[in-house]
Each structure stands twice: as C-alpha cells, then as structure tokens.
Amino acid sequence: QKEVEQNSGPLSVPEGAIASLNCTYSDRGSQSFFWYRQYSGKSPELIMFIYSNGDKEDGRFTAQLNKASQYVSLLIRDSQPSDSATYLCAASLRGTGRRALTFGSGTRLQVQP
Amino acid sequence: EAQVTQNPRYLITVTGKKLTVTCSQNMNHEYMSWYRQDPGLGLRQIYYSMNVEVTDKGDVPEGYKVSRKEKRNFPLILESPSPNQTSLYFCASSPRLISGNTIYFGEGSWLTVV
C-alpha cells in the first residue's frame, strides 16, 4: 500500500466550477499535510499546508483534513484554466522522521474554458 | 534571491558513463534532499542530508551516491548510469527536516541514459 495515495485523473471540470482533489494516507503518525501544484516540466510549488483537523482557507483554495479517516482534500473554487496542472499531496512525519515529505503520485486537473 | 540551483538542467548520456548533477542553495539550509520523478510514481526520495557530512538513504537510493562536504552543496553522483535512471531529478532544501512550508525545489534536471 502506498503511503500517500491519489487518483491520477485526469479530473476535468468546467471553468468556474469547484474542483475537488482527494488524498489518503496510511501512516497515522503523519502530522502535516501539504498540497503542491506542478506544471508540466516545472518544479512543485506549495499551495497550502494543514496541520489540524477541519478546514483551512486561502483565497480560492480550501484544504480539508480528517485525521480519523486519514483523508485530506483540496477544493479549488472558481476554477480557472490556469489551474490546470498536476496537484501533489504530501505528508510529513512528526519528529525526526527520515523523510521531510512523502508524496503521492499526483492528480492531473484539467479546467475546460 | 533565495534559490536552489541544479546543473545540468538537461543531459543525455550513455550507459556506464559516470556523471554528477550538482545542487547548490544560498539559504544556509541544513536539510537537503534529492528526488526523482517518474510518470505515475510521483516524487520519490533518493537521498537526504541533515547537515554537513550527514547523509542517509531515501526510498530509492540504489545506483546513486551523494556527498555533503559543504552546507550549500549536495551533488548527486551516478557512478554507472543505466537506462532505468532516466528521469526528472529535483534537488530540494529546507531550514529544518520537517518544514514542508519552506521546502525549496530546484528547477529540475532532465536526465536521459541511452
């Protein structure tokens, strides 16, 4: 079982719609969760991070964390064609774990004009 | 400007010819790491370093070596490259081990081994 799992997509949504991206993780020791956006051939860029159960909003983006269900999601409101990219979910272990981040394989989002 | 610089950005090489991908950061970060990215597999960690002279294996270390003689540099060495090491490589640095919000990625190095 992968430690961080994502549906590879593509997830296709019309412009202006809400895009919902999902991620599950296997390690209950995971404490911090991150969403990165990656355009083709470019390096990942951080969108949001979340530590606590519940929702965290930043502009058009909302991250949701449910530790009991080991589930984290990213909602993108008013989706724009420029949001078309691959979205990587990542988790980090608390303390001095050997890895900074464990990444999922990413979900490709396509926003149709 | 804070940055992580990788070189070369693009390289085509032949099987067995040793190569080094350099990585340098100008932020005085303690933690540095190498990832490779392959279709459908996401980013997988190759090696990481928590400080000078301290390195450890990540998830996919086979066929790679690293060194950390200076804080700013963390080169990735392929002693005898093979075609299955064809990939997109990212170097990353962070002030601390667990600081996803401050992980800085280099621009990536496309490596093709024929």
Image (spheres, coloured by chain):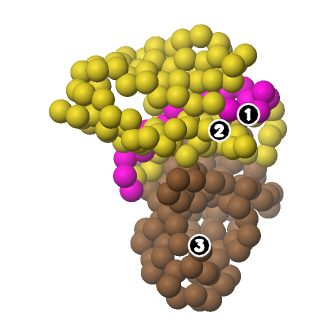
Task: Give the crowd class for mark 1: few <14, some 14-19, many >=20 residues within 10 Å.
Answer: some
**What is the CA distance from the residue labelled 2 to the residue labelled 1?**
7 Å
The residue that mark 1 highlights is A26
Q: Is residue A18 left or right of residue A73?
A: left
The residue that mark 2 highlights is A4
Residue A100, image x, y percentages: 69, 42
**What's the residue type where badge 1 is placed?**
Ser
**What is the CA distance from the residue labelled 3 to the residue labelled 1?**
28 Å
Residue B38, image x, y percentages: 53, 59
**What's the residue type where badge 2 is placed?**
Val
Q: Secondary structure at mark 3?
A: helix
Residue A9 location, quadrant: top left
Circles 2 and 1 in contact, beta carbons < 8 Å: yes
Q: Residue at x 23, y 34 (%)?
A: A112
Chain appearing in yellow on the rendered image: A
Closest to the observer: B112 or A48?
B112
Chain appearing in brown on the rendered image: B
**What is the CA distance from the residue labelled 3 to the residue labelled 2?**
23 Å
- The disc, 2 or 1, on the residue closer to the chain's N-terminal end is 2
Q: Secondary structure at mark 2?
A: strand
Residue B66 location, quadrant: bottom right
The residue that mark 3 highlights is B85
**What's the residue type where badge 3 is placed?**
Gln
Q: Is residue B102 visible?
A: no
The residue segment tinted magenta is: A25-41
Same chain for mark 2 and mark 1? The answer is yes
Task: Give the crowd class for mark 3: few <14, some 14-19, many >=20 residues within 10 Å.
Answer: many
Q: Is residue A110 visible?
A: yes
Which chain does the residue under circle 3 lie in? B
Residue A67, image x, y percentages: 70, 18
